[in-house]
Each structure stands twice: as C-alpha cells, then as structure tokens.
Image (cartoon, rainbow, N blue to C red):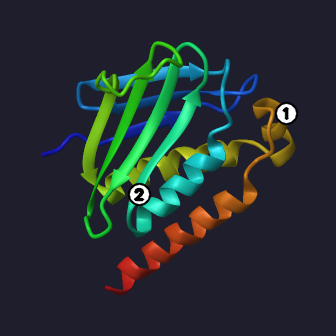
Amino acid sequence: MADHLRIEMSPPVDGGMMLRFSSGPQEFAADFTTQVCPFFEAFCDAIRVLHDGFIDDRIRLLIGAPECDLLLQAAAHSSQAVLKINLWPDHKRSTLVPEPTVFRFEGARQEIISPFVAALTSVRAGLSDAEFAQAYRAPFPTAAYAALMRRVQMTASDSIRT
C-alpha cells in the first residue's frame, strides 16, 4: 500500500503561511512568512490544471536565500502525477547540478489533488476576504479558487454517474 500524501497550510500570518507536506517517512515543512512570493492563486490554478491533462508547473514559494519551488508534473494521458519540492541555497541555480529535491510524491492525480483541495478549503473557510487580505498582504484569489471548486465539483459529479 502506498503512503498517502498529507498537506497542511496554516492560516496566513504576516504575508505568508506555514506549509507541511508529508507521506510515509518523508516530511517537508517550512514557514513561508518571509520573502514570500504570493502563491495561493498559483496553487489553485495548478491543481485545477492537474485535473485535466498535461502539467509541468513550477510554483516559486521563496525568493532569495533559500529559494523553494513546488513542481507539479503529469503527462497528458496519464493518470499518474508527481509533486516535488526543491530547495535551492540561493538564486544561483545551475543546470549542471541536479535539482535539490527535498520532498517527492508520485501517485494518482487524485492522490495529489484531494489533499491540496482540503488544505485550500480549510484556509478559505477560516477567514473572510478582508481577514485573508490583511494577513496575507494580497487579496484572496476568488476567481482562481472558484474555478478550482467548479472543477472539483464536476469531477465529483462525473464519478457519481459512473
């Protein structure tokens, strides 16, 4: 039996969030409160795209030193997907050095989508738009979140019919 992916996001504080990814013995947690590039909208968009087909998306979580990227990859006609987190010591990335992967999960698309949706929904349910904007220092990405939730509902409806 494969280890399940678990994703936790704290409510935003001072412009960022604590993120924790775990699966079996693997775990990666970081406080993305400083030097953060707003990533909440990018998460929503990437998870929505992961439902439908090809994705090779890199979401930058930290800028500066260290830098952190979350990668989502899936082939167009594959039910499998990969989630990777790379942690670079600084902005000087080199194609000569292998990516410094600190977390990797490979499994069915839904095994990645479901934990992300649950974490995003939990954060959304806990704060009003005004509270989110004040704590995150950026507005809540209402359109991206709504598009993701529509896609999740369509998938749920399709699975009930089959």
In the displayed structure, would residue 98 be above or below residue 38?
Answer: above
Q: Which residue is mark 2?
A: 55
Of helix, strand and loop, which one carries label 2? strand
Residue placed most toward the observer, 48 or 35: 35
Q: CA distance from mark 2 to mark 1?
A: 32 Å
> Which amino acid type corresponds to the residue marked 2 in the rendered image?
Ile
Q: Residue furthest bottom?
A: 161
Q: Position of residue 156 (x, y in %)?
A: 44, 73
Of tags 2 and 1, which is closer to the observer? 2
Residue placed most toward the observer, 158 or 35: 35
Q: Position of residue 158 (x, y in %)?
A: 41, 81
> Which amino acid type corresponds to the residue marked 1 in the rendered image?
Gln
**In percent of the image, x 53 and y 19: which residue is there?**
91
Q: Position of residue 87 (x, y in %)?
A: 43, 21
| Residue neighbourhood size for the residue with mark 2, other residues' Cα within 10 Å, grouped as few (<14), some (14–19), many (≥20) | some
**In percent of the image, x 38 and y 63: which residue is there?**
54
Q: Is residue 142 left or right of residue 92?
A: right
Image disc number at residue 82: none
Looking at the rendered image, the quarter that the C terminus falls into is bottom left
Of helix, strand and loop, which one carries label 1? helix
**In percent of the image, x 59 and y 45: which residue is there?**
122
Q: How many marks?
A: 2
In the displayed structure, would residue 137 be above or below residue 77?
Answer: above
Image disc number at residue 134: 1
Q: Position of residue 71 (x, y in %)?
A: 42, 41
